[in-house]
Image: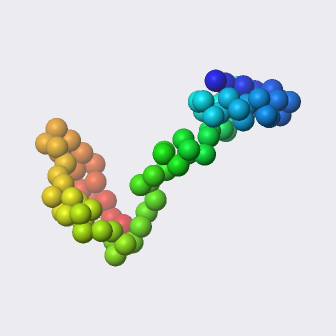
Amino acid sequence: MKVTSTEFQQNVGRYQDAAQQAPVAITKNGRTHTVLMSASFFEMVMKGRVARPVEDLDDDTLKAIAKSAVPAEYADLDDLIKDWKA
């Protein structure tokens, strides 16, 4: 669902209720400016996307990282960063 910021301001409760079912895109000057979503959807989206110190990772996660590899079909992407300096 997409609504203008004016519509949203005039019907906040309605769109808060709607956001429990699906995200509500709030537009400003014709462009999506903000998205309202339920807390449960936000938690699902953000789960695992927070940077953590490596010391905080459990053994299974560390083993999975150590065993991981980039599929061969993406090997050419290495060329994009070969000369990159931090």
* Location of residue 28 in the rendering, given as x and y in whole percent from the top left corner: 74, 32
Judge by depth and name the residue closer to the eye, 53 or 82: 53
Can residue 27 be seen by looking at this rendering?
no
- Quarter residue 77 falls in: top left
Residue 31 image point, x, y percent: 67, 29
Q: Residue at x 77, y 29 (%)?
A: 14
Q: Residue at x 71, y 32 (%)?
A: 17
Front residue of this view, candidates 19 and 4: 19
- The relative height of residue 71 versus residue 18 in the rendered view (above or below) is below
Please state which of residues 39 and 29 is positioned toward the viewer in this rendering: 39
**Colour theme:** rainbow
Q: Is residue 21 left or right of residue 29?
A: left
Quadrant (top left, top right, bottom left, bottom right) of the C terminus = bottom left
Q: Position of residue 82 (x, y in %)?
A: 24, 56
User: Quick one: which residue is furthest to the bottom in this view?
Assistant: 55
Q: Residue at x 65, y 33 (%)?
A: 19
Is 53 positioned to the left or the right of 4 in the image? left
For residue 11, side relative to residue 69 (left or right): right
Q: Residue at x 59, y 30 (%)?
A: 22
Residue 70 visible, this orientation: yes
Reply above or below: 6 against 76.
above
The image position of residue 21, as x and y in percent, is: 60, 30
